[in-house]
Image (tube, helix red, strand yellow):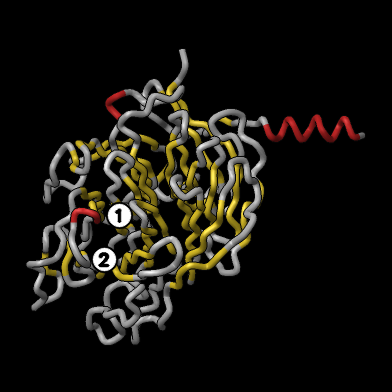
């Protein structure tokens, strides 16, 4: 009986499936490598294990994702809900977790499969939702680490308007904002304000710059506002992204608003894309599964897709992963404000097989030490691996 158990355990751990129905560019392959319920943001550890945040209180680890992936197990159970945000700080050997109300740090030793300790370093959503909110309250927290600081993104507690029709104004400075804190929990301060839901945080390994991707507001004229990614590090002080009065190229959406000093983002995607994850592909990557040179230094973006209806009742924007060519921290092609599809190309498609039929929705993205791209999917509850085909 014992021999039979080990046979089936080994078979399960070694199992990798082709991701049926999903499409990638020629020369690549995409496989499903793990089942993780509610998979959200991802962080690959130097030894090739994958940390996965989720929509629950559990953070998972998937061993050896660049080789033969092992069975996902719980790496940490957080004393809060929605442990969706994860980041790894290589220089400190620490894993950071963002949950609904807190940010946590976990010391990491190579090969750890279970957190040895969990320490709370910061609180978010410390105040109540905006008074008179329309009820569109964002609850996940994303984290990133760069240049000695932990970046923390928490979305707004309303879509754009109060019950009386006036623009939403947050009383809690941690909402609709990006904050920073030192890894020991000191020096908490706001770094960006009036950003509706900056779920996607990505660090450019070439420069250390922190980029943010925002999921835009609803109920504007159909097709607006365009959703964006921007180099937060390029702005001094507290960057003002203008929500909900100002969007896009400082366009005024609330009469009387002053949009002259708000940020004009560097990269635009169509409205309702719902940017959830982003990751830079290292410019000098030379691992076994390194992508072709045309992808190196570029930015991959996970669009969760839309619930908005257009085109005869179909979803306005399908889930997909797109690629933005970059030159350092500037897009290879500048924004065209009349064409939000000008700066990117599709990379993974096929999540939406018909007008209202979906098989998954991509979330977190991460690049492994050997060059594979990993993609979370909270709808299908799986993790994908994309790498060049080996001839």
Circle 1 residues within 10 Å: few <14, some 14–19, many ≥20: many
Where residue 306 sits: x, y (%)?
Answer: 36, 55
Q: Is residue 172 above or below residue 67?
A: below
- The front one of 172 and 21 is 172
Residue that carries the numbered disc 1 in the rendered image: 212
Where residue 144 sits: x, y (%)?
Answer: 39, 54
Q: Is residue 57 above or below residue 127?
A: above
The reply to whether residue 374 is in sight is: yes
Q: Is residue 248 left or right of residue 179?
A: left
The reply to whether residue 357 is in sight is: no
Q: Quadrant of residue 132?
A: bottom left
- The front one of 261 and 31 is 261
Q: Most extreme residue toward the top, as rendered? A: 391
Q: Most extreme residue toward the right, as rendered? A: 1
Circles 2 and 1 in contact, beta carbons < 8 Å? yes
Q: Is residue 47 left or right of residue 217?
A: right
Where residue 33 sits: x, y (%)?
Answer: 57, 36
Residue that carries the numbered disc 2 in the rendered image: 192
Q: Is residue 175 above or below residue 110?
A: below
Where residue 209 sits: x, y (%)?
Answer: 27, 49
Choose the circle earlier in sequence order: 2 or 1. 2
Q: Secondary structure at mark 1?
A: strand
- Dot label at residue 244: none
The CA distance from mark 2 to mark 1 is 10 Å
Q: Quadrant of residue 307?
A: bottom left
Circle 2 residues within 10 Å: few <14, some 14–19, many ≥20: many
Q: Is residue 175 left or right of residue 263?
A: right
Residue at x-position 60% and y-position 31%: 16
Q: Is residue 132 left or right of residue 106?
A: left
């Amino acid at each position: 009986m014992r021999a039979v158990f080990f046979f089936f355990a080994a078979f399960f751990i070694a199992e990798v499936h082709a991701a049926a129905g999903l499409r990638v560019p020629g020369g690549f392959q995409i496989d499903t490598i793990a089942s993780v319920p509610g998979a959200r943001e991802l962080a690959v550890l130097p030894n090739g294990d994958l940390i996965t945040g989720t929509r629950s209180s559990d953070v998972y680890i998937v061993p050896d994702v660049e080789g033969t992936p092992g069975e996902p197990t719980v790496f940490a159970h957080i004393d809060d809900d929605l442990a969706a945000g994860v980041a790894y700080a290589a220089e400190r050997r620490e894993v950071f977790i963002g949950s609904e109300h807190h940010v946590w740090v976990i010391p990491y030793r190579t090969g750890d499969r279970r957190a040895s300790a969990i320490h709370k370093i910061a609180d978010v959503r410390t105040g109540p939702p905006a008074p008179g909110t329309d009820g569109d309250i964002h609850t996940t927290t994303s984290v990133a680490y760069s240049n000695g600081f932990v970046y923390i993104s928490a979305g707004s507690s309303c879509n754009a308007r109060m019950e009386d029709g006036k623009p939403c104004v947050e009383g809690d400075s941690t909402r609709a904002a990006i904050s920073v804190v030192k890894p020991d929990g000191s020096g908490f301060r706001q770094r960006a304000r009036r950003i509706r839901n900056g779920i996607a945080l990505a660090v450019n390994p070439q420069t250390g710059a922190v980029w943010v991707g925002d999921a835009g507001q609803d109920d504007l004229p159909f097709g607006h506002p365009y959703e964006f990614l921007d180099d937060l590090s390029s702005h001094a002080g507290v960057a003002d992204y203008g929500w909900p009065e100002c969007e896009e190229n400082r366009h005024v959406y609330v009469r009387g608003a002053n949009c002259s000093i708000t940020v004009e983002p560097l990269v635009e995607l169509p409205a309702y894309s719902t940017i959830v994850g982003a990751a830079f592909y290292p410019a000098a990557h030379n691992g076994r599964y390194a992508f072709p040179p045309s992808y190196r230094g570029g930015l991959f973006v996970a669009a969760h897709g839309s619930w908005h209806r257009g085109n005869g009742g179909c979803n306005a924007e399908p889930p997909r992963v797109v690629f933005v060519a970059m030159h350092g921290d500037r897009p290879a092609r500048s924004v065209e404000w009349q064409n939000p599809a000008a700066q990117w190309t599709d990379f993974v498609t096929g999540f939406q097989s018909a007008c209202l039929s979906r098989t998954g929705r991509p979330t977190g993205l991460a690049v492994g030490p050997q060059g594979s791209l990993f993609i979370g999917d909270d709808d299908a509850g799986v993790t994908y691996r994309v790498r060049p085909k080996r001839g």
